[in-house]
Image (spheres, helix red, strand yellow):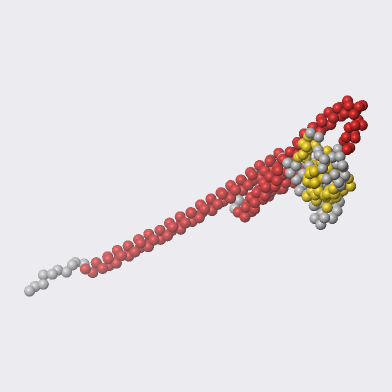
């Protein structure tokens, strides 16, 4: 029987075509992978570049912000006003420091993260320093206002008292003098001594830790016995009263005045020895300090000491 199966034509050319197609597909795949890899590198690099640009912009903005805040702080320092020469000198020193920081900040590169961070810390410190000065100035202004009002009231009361005494002087002078002398507990043997941390007497303002005021309440058989509050008032050479609190106020001849420290004592018409201490809580200046002692709304003794 004759074999009727026919062989395909050009069978020899089929295999090479298949190989060519496979090679073509592989090439496309490789090219696609390479393209994907290149695309990945491109977007990765683009992202990094954008991050760097963003960081540079942020740092540049922070530098500008620090510069603006330093400038504003300088203006705020210039607006601070006080009659205290020592504080004014310190304020000027802080202003010079800010001006120097502004000059140096201009030289800092925008990408110098570390230096800009240091300037931000310095800015924060300067703000805290300014807050402390504001508190000091407010305290001084408040005290000065109290002192001004106090001095005015005392002068008015004093003038009225002088006028009144003048009118009654001819008939009551001797009697008033005897009554005043008899009704006052006098402070005698007064000593006002500045001491250091070792409780040793010192004369330099910088070394003072406390001021020790000792005295004796004299014997007085006429006045009523019982508890007494003794007030000690220390005035600096510039007339500023040393006080641990703005609430340290007591009555004196119908007026409210500031005191430095107080002491409760039981008085039984016999001599009483006591000491009152004021612990330093502010800068002291050279000069003569005046110490007044009060009880029963009366001035009963005075003393002074000098610091270099």
Residue 255, horizontal then vertical, whole percent: 78, 34
Residue 93, horizontal then vertical, whole percent: 75, 46
Residue 235 appears anywhere in the view: no
Q: Residue at x 52, y 53 (%)?
A: 51
Residue 38 against residue 237 in the figure, above or below = below
Q: Nearer the viewer, residue 222 or 71?
A: 222
Q: Residue at x 64, y 53 (%)?
A: 118
Name which quarter of the figure residue 248 lies in. top right
Q: Residue furthest top?
A: 167
Q: Is 186 on the left-hand or right-hand side of 67?
A: right
The N terminus, quarter of image: bottom left
Q: Nearer the viewer, residue 68 or 224?
A: 224
Q: Residue furthest left?
A: 1
Q: Nearer the viewer, residue 202 or 130?
A: 202
Residue 179, horizontal then vertical, whole percent: 88, 35
Q: Is 282 on the left-hand or right-hand side of 163?
A: left
Q: Is 13 on the left-hand or right-hand side of 72?
A: left
Q: Residue at x 11, y 70 (%)?
A: 4
Residue 287, horizontal then vertical, whole percent: 86, 45
């Amino acid at each position: 029987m004759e074999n009727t199966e026919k062989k395909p034509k050009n069978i020899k050319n089929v295999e090479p075509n298949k190989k060519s197609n496979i090679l073509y597909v592989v090439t496309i795949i490789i090219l696609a992978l390479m393209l994907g890899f290149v695309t990945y590198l491109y977007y990765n690099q683009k992202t990094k570049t954008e991050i760097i640009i963003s960081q540079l912009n942020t740092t540049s903005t922070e530098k500008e912000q620090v510069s603006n805040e330093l400038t504003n702080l300088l203006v705020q320092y210039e607006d601070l006003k006080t009659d205290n020469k020592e504080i004014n000198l310190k304020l000027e020193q802080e202003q010079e420091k800010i001006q120097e920081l502004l000059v140096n900040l201009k030289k800092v590169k925008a990408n110098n993260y570390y230096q800009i961070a240091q300037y931000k810390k310095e800015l924060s410190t300067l703000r805290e320093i300014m807050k402390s000065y504001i508190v000091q100035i407010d305290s001084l202004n408040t005290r000065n206002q109290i002192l001004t009002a106090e001095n005015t009231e005392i002068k008015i009361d004093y003038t009225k008292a002088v006028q009144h005494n003048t009118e009654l002087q001819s008939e009551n002078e001797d009697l008033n003098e005897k009554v005043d002398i008899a009704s006052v507990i006098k402070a005698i043997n007064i000593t006002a001594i500045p001491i250091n941390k070792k409780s040793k007497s010192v004369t330099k303002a910088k070394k003072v830790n406390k001021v020790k005021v000792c005295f004796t309440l004299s014997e007085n058989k006429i006045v009523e016995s019982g508890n007494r509050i003794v007030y000690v008032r220390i005035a600096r050479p510039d007339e500023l009263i040393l006080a641990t609190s703005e609430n340290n106020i007591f009555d004196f001849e119908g007026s409210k005045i500031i005191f430095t420290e107080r002491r409760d004592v039981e008085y039984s018409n016999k001599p009483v020895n006591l000491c009152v201490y004021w612990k330093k809580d502010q800068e002291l200046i050279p000069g003569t300090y005046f110490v007044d002692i009060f009880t029963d709304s009366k001035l009963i003794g005075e003393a002074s000491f000098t610091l270099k």
